[in-house]
Image (cartoon, rainbow, N blue to C red):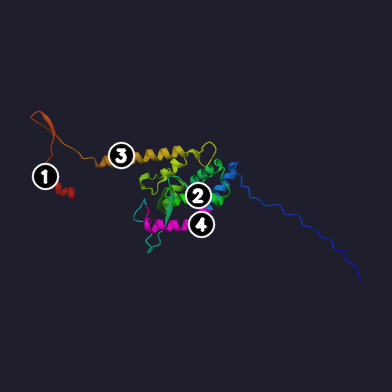
Amino acid sequence: MSRFKIETIAPLRPEEATYRPDIYSRKGRKKIVNEAKRIVRTSLEYEDYIFFLKTYVDMVKCAVYSNIKNDGKGKMSIEIHHDPLKLDDIVAIVLNKQIIENTFVSEFQLANEVARLHYQNKVGLIPLSVSIHELVTHSPDRLKIPLQLIYGNYTDFLREYDAYITEDLDAELHGLRQRLKDRYDYTKESLKIQFDELEPTYTILKVNGQSIPLPVPIEEEETSHQIA
């Protein structure tokens, strides 16, 4: 009877594969932000949130040209724009928070916090037609949107995450505070112009040496002209 030599071999245990995103370089952080944005935009939660906005918040017409709307009957498309903070800004700020607090694990966890902020209504959003959306995204100086038109309590986000807006470290956030201030000043000035147009005009008549504001009778012809 032949004999067989049986040798028992214990396979080496493979090393655990660990994913370690590069959070210490601008290039690495930019890659993380882009991946987290992709996860947010393609998630079922985000899709449901946009559906909620269009169904129950009436975000179906352009905030700039109200006659352009998507009521399900035409071919007009309405897109939801992040403003005054872009989605890139929001993700970069949340990433800063997780890095500083040593809670960052992956892009999925980062995207989860960003999605939660949407559901908490702490993100500014505005419905725009495709052409207007392209304009404000790529040429923001050509069309500025007053802050009062924006939906969402983005100011709550700014207060909560203010310490994590590190402009000196993040190229994505460079100049963000100044951009927000410029938008605030623009909104304040635009509101002032609107209210100035509505200011009543008084005619001052001097009666017995006293200046008294009195109503001035308007001729019938002039009244009919104004109504027309």
**Sequence order check: which comes first, mark 2 or mark 3?**
2
**Which amino acid does the dot numbered 3 rest on?**
Lys
Q: Between marks 1 and 2, how big is the CA–CA gap?
A: 65 Å
Q: Which residue is mark 4?
A: 43
Residue at left offset 42%, top offset 59%: 51
Instruction: Tell me the element at label 3.
Output: helix
Q: Nearer the viewer, mark 4 or mark 2?
A: 2
**Sequence order check: which comes first, mark 4 or mark 3?**
4
Q: Which residue is mark 3?
A: 192
Q: Between marks 1 and 3, how big is the CA–CA gap?
A: 32 Å
Q: Are marks 4 and 3 in contact (CB under 8 Å)?
A: no
**Which amino acid does the dot numbered 2 rest on?**
Glu
The percent coordinates of residue 121 (x first, y second) are 42, 50
Secondary structure mostly seen in magenta is helix
Q: Nearer the viewer, mark 1 or mark 2?
A: 2
**Which amino acid does the dot numbered 4 rest on?**
Ser
Instruction: Tell me the element at label 4.
Output: loop
Q: Between marks 1 and 4, how big is the CA–CA gap?
A: 65 Å
Q: Which residue is mark 1?
A: 219
